[in-house]
Image (cartoon, helix red, strand yellow):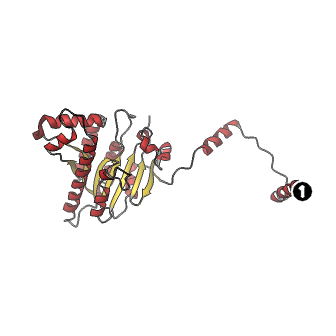
Amino acid sequence: MRCAVLWALMACSSNGKPPPPKVVPHASDAAIAVSVDAGPPLPAHQAYPDLAAAISVTVPADTRVVGFGELHARVDRAQVRSALSLFTAALPSFGTKISDLVVETWIVDPKCGQKAVETTAKVEKNVKRPEATKSEIGLLADAAKAANIQPHAMTLQCKDYEKLAPKNGEADPIAMLALTTKELQRIAQSAVKHRDKDPTHRPWVALYGGALHNDRFPGAGVAEWSYAETIDLATDGKYVEIDLIVPELAEADSVSQQQPWFPLVAAANRVLVWKRGERSFVIVLPRTKT
């Protein structure tokens, strides 16, 4: 009886027509099918031809402050084109919207003496910053000035250098995180307050630094190192977070590997934008062509 039922179902499904001839796939076809089916579907995202287009479309119209965050380039990571250089190249396309650009860097005050120079060198060694980053920051400042944007660097007091690297000690990363967050937040708030006095001001104040400090949804234990909540409150909910991800750097970063957007790294042949949450976006940049 069971066999009869199965045969009846097969007959109904074919509408009385003979079954189509069996097709034996070519070996290369089978390989393609396996490769397509092997990976999980990519997270929902938008694709753009370049970073300038992605930023222009992604940032909401009523935005007051944009916090751009990157995975910092390091000497022990792939030596590829940096997010900083790509951001600088894109800046002319949306620079007319920015009045002030706050950058996560500082200029050593000569009045603070040799201690300031030594501490700065220790910090750079600690974060494994490539020598080229200094030049790229300078190019970003030049591009900002060319677009009539006021660039800002962090201001360190002489006493701050002692906190960052106690006498005869190594750089203190916790002190660096705290000081950076405090300074970026202070400068951004000051810029907003100053520009708001002029009703014709440009719409955005922008910050550029590490992807930890701009986080709207920081993880447990790191919230104190993000300026996002304070800036969001100061701008009546008009703060936007944008992370810029170089795929080759994300592949070597254990934290990035755990993120929902990480599968996009493998498909980074264009600029891909993933929405983390309200006014929070991740932009995965294209791989460096070799």
x%, y% of residue 131?
A: 28, 34
Q: 215 left or right of 289?
A: left
Q: Secondary structure at mark 1?
A: loop
Give whichever of 45, 28 is nearer the camera.
45
Residue 279: image quadrant is bottom left
Three-letter code for the amino acid on which mark 1 is drawn: Met
Residue 198: image quadrant is bottom left
- Quadrant where the C terminus sits is top left
Residue 125, visible in the rendered structure? yes
| For residue 111, above or below residue 231 | above
Q: Residues within 10 Å of mark 1 (few under 14, many from 20)?
A: few
Q: Residue at x 37, y 53 (%)?
A: 218
Give whichever of 253, 102 is nearer the camera.
253
Give whichever of 147, 196 is nearer the camera.
196
Q: Residue at x 26, y 42 (%)?
A: 137
Q: 161 left or right of 125?
A: left
| For residue 79, above or below residue 105 | above
- Quadrant where the N terminus sits is bottom right
x%, y% of residue 46?
A: 47, 54
x%, y% of residue 64?
A: 30, 61
Image label count? 1
| For residue 197, above or below residue 83 | below
x%, y% of residue 6?
A: 84, 55
Residue 107, visible in the rendered structure? no
Give whichever of 161, 124 is nearer the camera.
161
Q: 190 left or right of 8?
A: left
**Residue position marked by numbered label 1 in the rendering:** 1
